Amino acid sequence: MKQVTIPSGANLSQLYRELAGDYPKFFKMDIASKLGFLLTEMLVAGAPDRFTPRQDRAVLVFSREGCVANDRHYADSMADFPSPALFVYTLPNIVTGEIAIRNKYAGESSAYVLEAFDKAQIQAIVRQAFLDRETRSAIVAWIDCPSDTEWTAEAWLIDNNDI
Amino acid sequence: MTPVYCIGSGVVTPLGNTPQDVFRAVRQGRTALCLHTGYPEPYYASLLSRDCVGKGVLFDQIVRDAASAAVKEAGIDASSPRTGLVLSTIKGNVEVLGKADVSLAVQARRLANALGVTTQPTVVSNACISGLAALVQGMRMIQSGQYDHVIVAGAEVQSRFIVTGFQSLKALSLTACKPFDAARDGLNLGEAAAAMVLSSHADASQWELVSGCIRNDANHISGPSRTGEGSYNALRYVLQHARPEDVAFVNVHGTATRYNDEMEAIALYRAGLQNMPVNALKGVFGHTMGAAGILESIISILALETGVVLPTKGFETLGVSVPVNVSAKERPAQGNSFVKLLSGFGGVNGALLFRKGGAR
Amino acid sequence: MEQLINEIKLKVIDALNLEGMTPEDIEDNAPLFGDEGLGLDSIDVLELIVLLEKNYGIRLATPADGKAVFTSIATMASYVAANRTK
């Protein structure tokens, strides 16, 4: 099992240039999606055949706050001209979609909201995700961003031998 | 794997507050869809009455009522350490954004307290497939032995936040939506709550949740896949658990947007289901988002209990590029199983196979 | 017209978060969508509709109405010049 972290307040644009640099859609993403994108880059960089489409890898993202930082941006735009580009990120699972699109993961993708980071609860849900007979590995992340500048962002690459 | 059954259900909708009442209303062709004054643009939606809310929060009230009814029917002890709770919603009580804590975990905590649930609640927020994904999560909690019973409740209330958002996406129709129809021009939003109690203990008459699957298109965060990839893959997975002749119908997502219905038609066609009876309930309830997967499953169960494929309200002339067998009118159902199908933003798709009890 | 083209480029870069791009990087007649040119997508079109309404008082009902308008920066500029209400 591989684990990565992005410290709160880190310069994400700089991190993006170091880790990827070839995916300008990054700059359109909300904070949770940016963190999910970068955490996954850190986990799978250099993996053989990393962009070959696959259905055997799940993407499971957990948080307490969902996408509240972006919700506030959308609500600000609502008073004037509601922004479609902000509205599409007002769903807690869009981060899982961004990871799936970037890495061509056509397996399971789900977003969960918990009252707090609870290792036992997350472990149980991840173990249960492997009940899908086609799932062999999972990107699991805790991405909690109360705002655009403070967050907790950790991710793990787990395969069925870890379960 | 431990079989999982639905042993209780509850609903709160503009058409009634018991599954039987709502099912009867659907058969009578009723709907609460109508034009509402907007923010400022008008919008066509199926909304609950605000009259009886009082000082409470509408979201909390409807999800509690639906879940309580399901628990009562199931006759389980909600406070048992062997009872779990899964909440499905997309935006919860987002109306209070800026004034109070809008984390969906707050709604889950209030629901747990209202029901007397003592275990840690889980929220599944997986866009428009949330309800179905929550049922899959509930199934797995039982299959893994974590719980004996899981209460799965879903709800959505509409607000300026959601309505203006869908308007900005140009996704709303200004008339009653027309799933799969040639003249379809967008979706209608809806409000509802729905709940099921899942259990490993059941008698022979109860419905089994046989197999559920979630798959991503890995294509675009808001545009449905042109090849129906995720929806096809989810269908393919659950259909491995059924004999083709046993499946009576597929209750599809059928939002009545150009791209969703086209995508679903392609997925059904690729799965070899071009002759399979297909129906959609969005013309009755609108798109009830976090409630949709559970509500539409409950109504589909009652339909197959009664031996019918429900009509697709709003559908007249097929308007997709491949043949699909959409039910315009009610017709007799043949088989003991059905598939619930949903898709949503984030490229996510889900399928869930239900089978009538005693038919294993 | 040249001034309007430049203004629209700046607004497009800002509205669509085209990080690191300057007006000089966008050719007046290059396609905005598809693999050539800017490679914008369906959400970008919707955001461009908002841009027209917000800045120039022009309302497009559906993305389909905008197809010809959003061919390139040049087509956007001539449409704005002919239809602006502010």
Image (cartoon, rainbow, N blue to C red):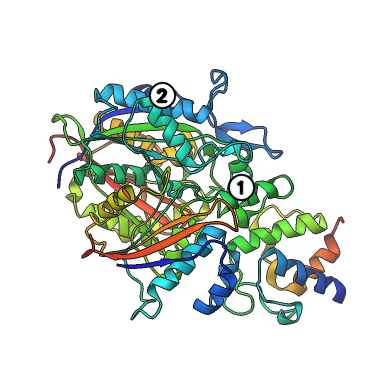
Kind of residue indicated by mark 2: Asp
Which quarter of the rendered picture does the N terminus of chain A lie within?
A: bottom left
Crowd around label 1: few <14 · some 14–19 · many ≥20 (10 Å): many
Residue B196 visible in the current orientation: yes
Return the residue nearer the eye: C29 or B121: B121
Question: x%, y% of residue B270?
Answer: 32, 61
Residue at figure coordinates x 65%, y 51% from the top left: A73
| Residue on which disc 2 sits | B65
| B203 relative to A69, above or below | above
Specify the label residue B165 is tagged with. Answer: 1
Question: x%, y% of residue B9?
Answer: 31, 28
Specify the label residue B147 is tagged with. Answer: none
Kind of residue indicated by mark 1: Gly
**Between marks 1 and 2, how big is the CA–CA gap?**
28 Å
| B232 relative to B76, above or below | below
Return the residue nearer the eye: C2 or B304: C2
Chain letter for the residue marked with disc 1 in the picture: B
Figure quadrant of residue A55: bottom left
* Label 1 with label 2: CB-CB less than 8 Å: no
Labels 1 and 2 in the same subunit: yes
- Whether residue B37 sits left or right of residue A62 in the image: it is right
Chain letter for the residue marked with disc 2 in the picture: B
| B10 relative to B352, above or below | above
The residue tagged with tag 1: helix, strand or loop?
helix
